[in-house]
Image (cartoon, grey):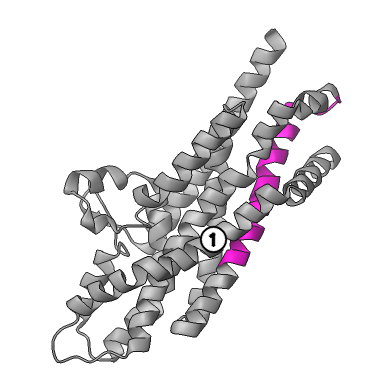
């Protein structure tokens, strides 16, 4: 346990001391929030206004609250994964610099080393994502706050769960990387592609039916849906109070992927938590198995 704590402290310190990696992780969510609010806000507003029945007047603040919730949920669901890849790059950098070889020369078990990378990456990512969550809450308070106390708590619970998922996923991928070039390629692919396949940048309702079926098997899809439900739940409830028919509100929820389907059946909130949590457990087990196999290969050489 002492060795594991020492590894976690060492990795966290190196991450926060690396100003380039730390500030990139810290600034990226803020930049995304600005870009989302600048380029996507008006598109989302037009989309929602077209779905409101004629004769029903909705306050601009409520529309802003709905759109803000969609923007915030997209940003947070993506950041929990992309930041995890960034913070977990220390695993690869130690290989490139030779630090990992120096560490393994000491009496440190490979299991301790592997879990040290995972846990430290989780904590580092969580700190950055909580900071991003604070920025998002500040943004919502300025344009339209409709979050209840339970929604607020669930949002930060979702951040923790998605950070666990992002850290597990990045750990499995990064363990096979061994150069700066590979780091750059993987970082670029994840940063540009993950937001689309999880339905954050563009709702899956706008994709073809075949693509929707494929993406319904991705755990990140349900993580994003969880975040959208909790970020937009209060604003949708306010719509109903303002006279918008519940059927119309349900269609709005479906249009932004709050109600994803699996095998043609709607997936509830509890089932979403089950899918994402199970995926985290499976990914961690896979990560452990990979480390065991690689450790045996190294000893046999």
Q: Is residue 167 above or below residue 233?
A: above
In this rendered view, identify the residue nearer to me: 264 or 15: 15
User: Is residue 126 found inside the magenta-colored segment of the image?
Assistant: yes
Q: Position of residue 152 (x, y in %)?
A: 52, 75
Q: Is residue 273 left or right of residue 24?
A: left
Q: Position of residue 121 (x, y in %)?
A: 66, 46
Q: Main secondary structure of the magenta part?
A: helix
In this rendered view, identify the residue nearer to me: 208 or 243: 208
Quadrant assignment for the N terminus: top right
Q: Which residue is mark 1?
A: 29
Residue lying at 45% horizontally and 83% vertically, measured from the top left: 143
Residue lying at 57% horizontally and 65% vertically, measured from the top left: 132
Q: Is residue 121 visible?
A: yes
Q: Is residue 113 above or below residue 76?
A: above
Q: Is residue 172 visible?
A: no
Residue lying at 23% horizontally and 91% vertically, measured from the top left: 243
Give the residues in magenta. Answer: 106-132
Quadrant assignment for the C terminus: top right
């Amino acid at each position: 346990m002492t060795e594991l704590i020492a590894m976690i402290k060492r990795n966290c310190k190196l991450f926060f001391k690396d100003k380039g990696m730390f500030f990139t992780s810290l600034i990226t969510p803020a930049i995304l929030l600005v870009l989302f609010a600048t380029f996507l806000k008006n598109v989302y507003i037009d989309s929602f206004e077209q779905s409101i029945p004629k004769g029903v007047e909705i306050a601009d603040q409520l529309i802003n609250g709905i759109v803000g919730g969609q923007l915030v949920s997209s940003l947070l669901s993506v950041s929990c994964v992309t930041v995890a890849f960034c913070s977990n790059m220390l695993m690869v950098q130690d290989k490139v610099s030779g630090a990992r070889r120096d560490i393994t020369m000491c009496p440190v078990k490979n299991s301790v080393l592997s879990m040290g990378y995972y846990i430290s990456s989780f904590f580092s990512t969580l700190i950055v994502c909580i900071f991003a969550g604070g920025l998002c809450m500040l943004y919502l308070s300025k344009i339209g706050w409709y979050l209840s106390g339970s929604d607020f708590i669930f949002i930060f619970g979702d951040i923790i769960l998605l950070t666990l998922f992002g850290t597990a996923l990045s750990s499995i991928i990064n363990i096979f990387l061994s150069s700066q070039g590979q780091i750059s390629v993987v970082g670029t692919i994840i940063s540009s592609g993950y937001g689309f396949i999880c339905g954050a940048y563009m709702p899956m309702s706008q994709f073809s039916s075949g693509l929707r079926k494929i993406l319904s098997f991705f755990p990140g899809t349900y993580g994003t849906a969880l975040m959208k439900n909790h970020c937009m739940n209060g604003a949708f409830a306010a719509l109903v109070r303002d006279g918008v028919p519940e059927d119309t509100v349900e269609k709005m929820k479906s249009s932004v992927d709050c109600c994803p389907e699996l095998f043609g059946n709607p997936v509830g909130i509890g089932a979403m938590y089950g899918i994402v949590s199970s995926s985290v457990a499976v990914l961690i087990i896979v990560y452990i198995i990979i480390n065991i196999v690689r450790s045996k290969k190294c000893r046999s050489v």
